[in-house]
Amino acid sequence: HLEAEGFCVLELAMTANEHAELIAEFRRSVQLMNRATLDPANPQLPPLETISRRHLPPYVGKGLQTFYGMAHTPYADRMRLHPEVRRAFEVIYGTKALACSLDAPAIHLEPPTGKNVNWLHQDQDARHTYLSVQGCLVLRSAYARLAQMVSWQPLARFTGEQRALCASARQSGSSMTHDNARVNKKPLPTFRPDPRQFTHLRVYNAEAAKELADEDYEARLRKLIPPEPPSPPSN
């Protein structure tokens, strides 16, 4: 269907426990980005009903959360690293040697308004001479949309410049396009709009992760973006 129509929809075989774990990662990630404790009764995992738009970065377009490092929280990385998501891209590209995009979560607490509310868009255009597929993993929740944009690509197509951009984005909290070719919303979106308007939020970068004991922050990046292409097997 992907080859014939240019898109496909996959229903992941996710257990109730796996779904609950991903929802919990979102709740934990929201708390990590907020300086104040959202719910004293649940200091690490605030209930979904206590989370409002104030507790999230400001919307960019169509609910995308590209500010304040939301694209690098445990929730975002866990969605990208879900085994069935990666398996889908392995089938598409015919290889296990893949690197992942650092694109933005897509979150709407209320139903979106306006045209094209599902924001389906074309990632393959005249500038791309290769297959480029972007996916969106959507979780069922009390929200109108709780999702993560994700795109894995063959590692052989991953350049040193892209690797350097990924490291920069991880440090600054910025998100990146589906093919990791540029940082979204230049200049770096972490500081747009003016962060003084959102002093209750913290930029979730490597420094904040260390302070808040997110011990596998950089380890997750190494899984998403391998440091170097794998060596060819020896004879």
Image (tube, rainbow, N blue to C red):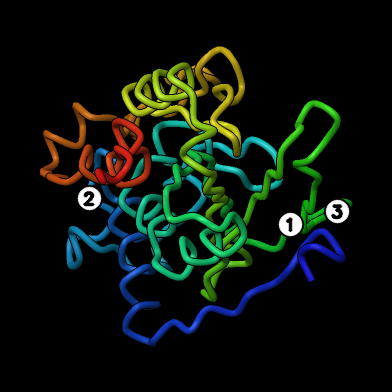
Q: Earlier in the sequence, mark 2 or mark 1?
A: 2
- Nearest to the eye among marks 2 and 1: give it: 1
Q: Secondary structure at mark 2?
A: loop
From the image, tell me which residue sits under label 3: 116
Q: Nearer the viewer, residue 112 or 90?
A: 90
Q: Secondary structure at mark 3?
A: loop
From the image, tell me which residue sits under label 1: 112
**Neighbours of disc 2 within 10 Å: few (<14), some (14-19), many (20+):** some
From the image, tell me which residue sits under label 2: 37
Residue 45 appears in which quarter of the rendering?
bottom left
Q: What's the residue type where badge 1 is placed?
A: Pro
Q: What's the residue type where badge 3 is placed?
A: Asn
Drawn side of residue 199 relative to residue 158, left or right: left
Tell me how far mark 2 sits from mark 3, CA to CA: 36 Å
Mark 2 and mark 1 in contact? Answer it, CB < 8 Å.
Answer: no
Tell me how far mark 2 sits from mark 1, CA to CA: 28 Å
Q: Earlier in the sequence, mark 2 or mark 3?
A: 2
Residue at the top extreme of this rendering: 187
**Is residue 218 something that shows in the picture?**
yes
Tell me how far mark 1 sits from mark 3, CA to CA: 9 Å
Q: Position of residue 186 (x, y in %)?
A: 59, 15
- Look at 38% across and 87% down and name the residue there: 16
Drawn side of residue 218 relative to residue 20, left or right: left
**Is residue 196 something that shows in the picture?**
no
- Look at 20% across and 66% down and name the residue there: 42
Q: How many callouts does the rendering have?
A: 3
Q: Position of residue 95 (x, y in %)?
A: 49, 55
Q: Secondary structure at mark 1?
A: loop
Q: Nearer the viewer, residue 59 or 180?
A: 180
- Look at 22% across and 50% down and name the residue there: 37
